[in-house]
């Protein structure tokens, strides 16, 4: 038998990681797409369903509230279900939400039900997809993989923005959700075919989170990271939910406002994997980088608060690209620091993210409905600055946990300590 070439061996090693990253990203898209489609199509939903800004905030908050309530338990549930049962279940929940909004939403309160179901999908998918990346992707490319996976969220926002001129203003908003539901349905058999049946022998061994308690010294770092993520998520989800409505009030045409949301989403899509590539090469890759990105997002929100069309558009791009581009990096830092407790740690830190995502749209829905948009975007900038401060506190704890040079605190070598080809 002819021996495989070095190039063939290299390709065979990289394919599992590439497939894992793609599956993690696509399942995340399905889970978050319902809530961002609701935000992107808010103008049309307002006309057909009688939805006000406060109602939009309540519906979006329901998604994040369920995600917050179920996030920590989902880390344990994900460990029990495994990837081959858990990931199709999460996609099925996302499919149910999309289909329900498309065909069974006569009035806006029904959105709360359907987005709650999507929230359950979102809570479940992150521990599963993060575990898949940790098991299947080599450590030298792992930050990039997390960045690509988290780029699924602005990809969902991009889809929402582009759906306004393509679907909502032509055939109707219901068809947007129906098309997304069709994608989710077609994705399930592909997912079942490609998911690994067992963890590869080359993967780093992990401890089952359902049987191993989190080390006590890890918990303060996770709590600080959760607080930073909560503050950052609060302001970021306000951007995702209210950009289109606020842009129309600032003088943008509804179709142009949707395209602005799409353009800003491209910045978020690019930022997350690029930050991951830098982290894999030893540039940044810590909670300090997260703090800098949140601070930049604060500047973008100040630009949106001015209400000037040019400043609003530029600030929106910065708020998406930097102020919301840190998510993948946080997942990477948590997985690097908490390994092999990634699923549990993800559940805890995501709880903070989801709480922020719940309270942000809910409170800002009231603010945007009662005050000038400048007030709402100004307060969002304050939240972004607070999140940057919390991220710096988390960075100090992260440094203490990684005090031993080149080794993560729970047994996995850092990227700098792993030789080429490992």
Image (tube, helix red, strand yellow):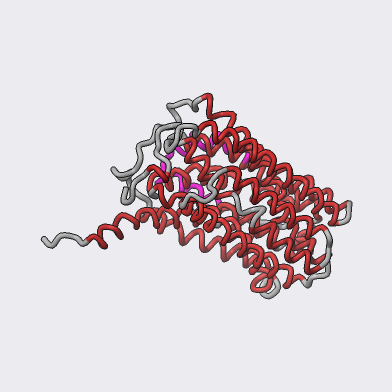
Q: Quarter-wise, where is residue 390 in the image?
A: top right
**Observer-nearest of 292 and 107:** 292
Specify the quadrant that holds the N terminus.
bottom left
Q: Quadrant of residue 385?
A: top right
At a point 77% along the width and 49% down the height, the residue shown is: 380
Q: Is residue 149 visible?
A: no
- Whole-percent x, y for residue 229 in the image: 64, 42
Q: What type of secondary structure mainly makes up the magenta span? A: helix
Q: Is residue 35 magenta?
A: no
Answer with left or right where residue 152 lies relative to residue 292: left
Residue depicted at x 43% and y 48%: 133
Q: Residue furthest front?
A: 405
Image position, residue 319 (x, y; %): 69, 57
Q: Nearer the viewer, residue 292 or 249?
A: 292
From the viewer's perspective, is residue 308 above or below residue 328? below
The structure residue drawn at horizontal position 55% and vertical position 57%, both measured from the top left corner, is 151
Q: Is residue 204 left or right of residue 149?
A: left
Is residue 73 in the magenta section?
Answer: yes
Residue at the outermost right position: 371
Q: Residue at x 39, y 56 (%)?
A: 19
x, y (%) of residue 259?
68, 70
Residue lying furthest left: 1
Q: Which residues are magenta?
A: 68-94
Q: How many marks?
A: 0
- Res. 395 in view: yes
Q: Position of residue 164 (x, y in %)?
A: 68, 69
Name the quadrant containing residue 320. Answer: bottom right
Q: Is residue 281 left or right of residue 115?
A: left
């Amino acid at each position: 038998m002819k021996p495989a070439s070095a190039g063939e061996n290299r390709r065979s090693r990289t394919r599992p990681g590439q497939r894992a990253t793609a599956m993690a990203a696509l399942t995340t898209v399905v889970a978050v797409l319902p809530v961002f489609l609701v935000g992107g199509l808010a103008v049309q939903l307002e006309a057909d369903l009688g939805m006000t800004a406060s109602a939009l905030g309540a519906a979006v908050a329901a998604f994040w509230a369920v995600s917050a309530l179920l996030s920590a338990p989902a880390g344990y549930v994900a460990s029990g279900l495994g990837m081959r049962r858990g990931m199709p279940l999460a996609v099925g929940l996302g499919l149910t939400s999309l289909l329900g909004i498309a065909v069974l939403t006569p009035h806006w309160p029904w959105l709360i039900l359907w987005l709650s179901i999507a929230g359950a999908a979102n809570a479940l998918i992150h521990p599963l997809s993060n575990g898949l990346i940790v098991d299947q992707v080599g450590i030298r490319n792992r930050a990039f993989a997390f960045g690509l996976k988290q780029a699924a969220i602005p990809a969902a926002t991009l889809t929402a923005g582009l759906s306004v001129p393509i679907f909502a203003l032509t055939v109707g908003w219901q068809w947007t959700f129906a098309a997304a539901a069709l994608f989710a349905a077609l994705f399930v058999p592909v997912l079942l075919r490609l998911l690994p049946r067992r963890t590869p022998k080359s993967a780093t061994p992990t401890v089952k989170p359902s049987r191993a308690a989190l080390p006590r010294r890890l918990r303060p770092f996770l709590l600080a990271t959760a607080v930073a993520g909560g503050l950052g998520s609060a302001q970021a989800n306000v951007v995702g939910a209210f950009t289109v409505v606020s842009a129309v009030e600032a003088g943008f045409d509804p179709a142009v406002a949707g395209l602005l949301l799409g353009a800003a989403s491209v910045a978020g899509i690019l930022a997350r994997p690029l930050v991951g590539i830098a982290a894999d090469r030893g540039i940044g890759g810590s909670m300090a980088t997260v703090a800098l990105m949140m601070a930049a997002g604060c500047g973008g929100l100040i630009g949106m608060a001015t209400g000037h069309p040019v400043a609003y558009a530029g600030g929106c791009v910065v708020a998406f690209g930097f102020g919301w581009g840190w998510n993948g990096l946080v997942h990477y830092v948590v997985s690097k620091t908490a390994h092999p407790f990634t699923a549990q740690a993800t559940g805890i830190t995501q709880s903070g993210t989801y709480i922020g995502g719940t309270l942000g749209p809910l409170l800002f829905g009231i603010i945007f409905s009662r005050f000038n948009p400048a007030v709402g975007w100004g307060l969002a900038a304050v939240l972004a600055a607070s999140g940057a401060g919390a991220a710096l506190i988390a960075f100090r704890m992260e440094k203490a946990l990684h005090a031993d040079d080149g080794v993560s605190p729970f047994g996995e070598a850092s990227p700098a300590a792993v030789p080429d080809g490992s």
